[in-house]
Amino acid sequence: MTTVSPHDLQRAAQVLDAGGVVAYPSETVWGLAAHPQRPDGIRRLYDLKGRVADKPVQVSCASAEAARALAAPDIGFDDLAQALAPFWPGPLTAVLPASAACPPLLAPEGRVGIRVPDHPVALALLNAVGGVLATTSCNPSGEAPALTFAAALAMNLGDMVLPDGDVPCLGIPSTVLLLPEGRVLREGALPAQQVLARLERAPL
């Protein structure tokens, strides 16, 4: 059951559809979101955060199914998603070869970082806009991310801040893996070795 009001979700969806940026809670840290089909929104996301243009943002998805079209067809996404099922939803970002359908701004080097968050408000927001959003942490580049609604409000980086519905974040960012190579790009809330051990046993 969602912990955010339908009115707030509708307003957030309208902001994103118009090319705006929304701050929202996740189970890791607070995030900033833009609509993946609005290049102006993605550029605004970069500008508000002060992020360098060659550092890609990730793509948050409502489910592995919602992410399928973003990944290159030759990597066997369905098998990979099945292997990752214990960790999605969860604090795992998989950096995969991108498909031709993935917006170029989200895969500047032919790779796209995909995550399925495990927070009721984040998932409600994703489902309200079609299942996919361009996302990054809620903080100016080089600073610590927001961990509370009050901190996200104080940063004043989005056109709207969704309340967290009293579901707190962990305060630890997601673990980032380069797949199918199995290289750890960032150790985060989920022990990378758990994921790699699962992938080794999976018939990919």
Image (tube, rainbow, N blue to C red):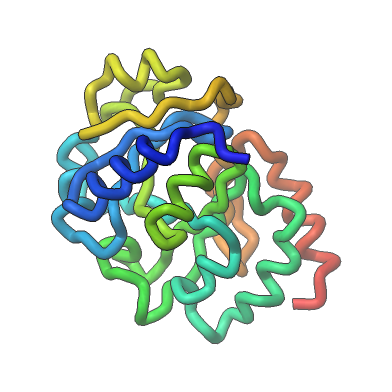
Relative to 42, 110 lies left or right:
right
Expressed as whole percent of the image width and height from the top left, the position of residue 146 reads 40, 22
Quadrant placement of the N terminus: top right
Relative to 24, 174 lies left or right:
right
Expressed as whole percent of the image width and height from the top left, the position of residue 164 reads 48, 26
Expressed as whole percent of the image width and height from the top left, the position of residue 120 reads 57, 39
Expressed as whole percent of the image width and height from the top left, the position of residue 181 reads 61, 66
Whether residue 161 is situated above or below residue 11 in the rendered picture: above
Q: Residue furthest bottom?
A: 74
Residue 109's quadrant in the figure? bottom left
Q: Residue furthest right?
A: 201
Relative to 1, 47 lies left or right:
left
Q: Residue at x 26, y 32 (%)?
A: 160
Q: Residue at x 30, y 19 (%)?
A: 153
Whether residue 99 is situated above or below residue 93 in the rendered picture: below
Quadrant placement of the C terminus: bottom right
Residue 167's quadrant in the figure? top right
Whether residue 43 is situated above or below residue 80 in the rendered picture: above
| Along the line of sight, the residue nearer the viewer: 161 or 107 | 161
Q: Residue at x 23, y 29 (%)?
A: 157
